[in-house]
Image: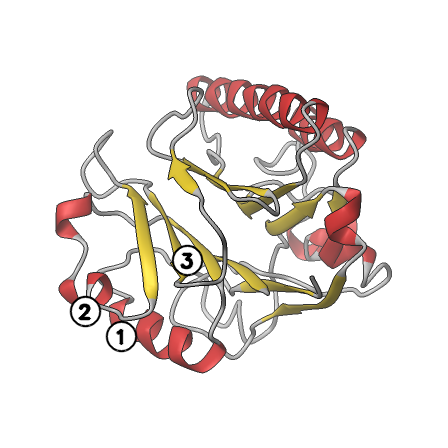
């Protein structure tokens, strides 16, 4: 089973790229962030893709803002549900409960400005409480999405590793550490512990991507049983239509 996360940065702008990527990579489940569309605005070229069930938490908070989706290959799971959790803000979250695990797909707030930074920290705290409850209930959990935090210095290019920058602040890094302390594994980093320049997002600067001046902020965190059956992790650097690269983990169930 392959689970992927991809900040698509506007599904209407990326509809042909998404179709081509799905046909090429064939993930079983993909979480899409920054859909930037209400459900009724999702292009028919996407809603009509055969072989996938599609779930949306569209941009109803603000037009053309945020929004997430989850696409599930027909037959890849047993009976499951998919809906926003009670703590969702700004159309940023979908939760899929399947027999094998619970998948939380999230677009964490960036946190620019004092007011939105507080929203980010509250969201991460609510997410932690939600995951902790699932683990207490005996659920295996996959938390996937655009986390908007570079957890370690190795996760951001040295040219942008500036103290106090949004995405690098001690409070938000501590919030992610608190998630990991629940028993989650940052599986891409664990399987690439010393790999530098392993980035998933690049600023919109001239030649920033070509020079790999990036950040690793798109992540998949897994409880131990799921982490133990991961066979492959990958960052799809060939897909360049968005400012984020897709991240995929492959499980051997």
Q: Quadrant of residue 83?
A: top left
- Residue 120 against residue 71 in the figure, above or below: above
- Which residue is drawn at the image coordinates 21% and 33% (left, top)? 60
Q: Secondary structure at mark 3?
A: strand
Where residue 96 is drawn, which disc sits there?
none
Asked if the residue under mark 1 is in contact with the one under mark 2, i.e. CB atoms within 8 Å, the reply is yes
Q: Which mark is residue 72?
A: 3
Visible residue check, residue 204: yes
Q: Position of residue 233 (x, y in %)?
A: 69, 66
Of badges 2 and 1, nearer the viewer stands: 2
Residue 45: image tag: 2
Q: Neighbour class for label 2 at 10 Å: few (<14), some, many (≥20)?
A: few
Question: In the image, residue 106 lies at what x, y percent?
Answer: 48, 40
Residue sitting nearer the eye, 133 or 165? 133
Inter-mark Cα distance, 3 to 2: 16 Å
Q: Earlier in the sequence, mark 3 or mark 2?
A: 2
Marks 2 and 1, the one that precedes in the sequence: 1
Mark 1 sits on what residue? 16
Q: Earlier in the sequence, mark 3 or mark 1?
A: 1
Left or right: 244 with respect to 2? Answer: left
Question: Helix, strand, or loop for circle 1?
Answer: helix
At x 54%, y 58%, the residue is 201
Q: Is residue 103 above or below residue 207?
A: above
Position of the N terminus, as image quadrant, is bottom right
Q: Position of residue 22 (x, y in %)?
A: 40, 73
């Amino acid at each position: 089973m392959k689970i992927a996360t991809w900040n698509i940065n506007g599904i209407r702008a990326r509809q042909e790229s998404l179709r081509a990527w799905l046909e090429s990579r064939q993930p079983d489940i993909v979480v899409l962030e920054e859909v930037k569309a209400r459900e009724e605005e999702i292009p028919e070229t996407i809603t009509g893709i055969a072989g996938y069930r599609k779930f949306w938490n569209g941009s109803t908070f603000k037009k053309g803002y945020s929004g997430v989706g989850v696409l599930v290959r027909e037959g890849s799971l047993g009976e499951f549900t998919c809906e926003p959790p009670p703590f969702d803000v700004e159309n940023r979250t979908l939760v899929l409960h399947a027999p094998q695990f619970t998948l939380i797909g999230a677009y964490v707030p960036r946190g620019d400005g004092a007011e939105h930074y507080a929203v980010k920290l509250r969201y991460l705290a609510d997410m932690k409480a939600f995951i902790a409850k699932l683990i207490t209930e005996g659920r295996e959990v996959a938390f996937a999405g655009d986390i908007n935090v570079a957890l370690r210095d190795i996760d951001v290019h040295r040219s942008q590793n500036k103290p106090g920058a949004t995405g690098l602040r001690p409070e938000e890094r501590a919030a992610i550490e608190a998630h990991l302390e629940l028993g989650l594994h940052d599986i891409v980093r664990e399987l690439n512990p010393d790999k530098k320049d392993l980035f998933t997002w690049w600023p919109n600067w001239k030649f920033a991507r070509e020079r790999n001046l990036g950040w690793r902020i798109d992540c998949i965190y897994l409880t131990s049983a799921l982490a133990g059956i991961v066979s492959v992790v990958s960052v799809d650097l060939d897909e360049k239509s968005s400012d984020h690269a897709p991240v995929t983990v492959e499980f051997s169930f």
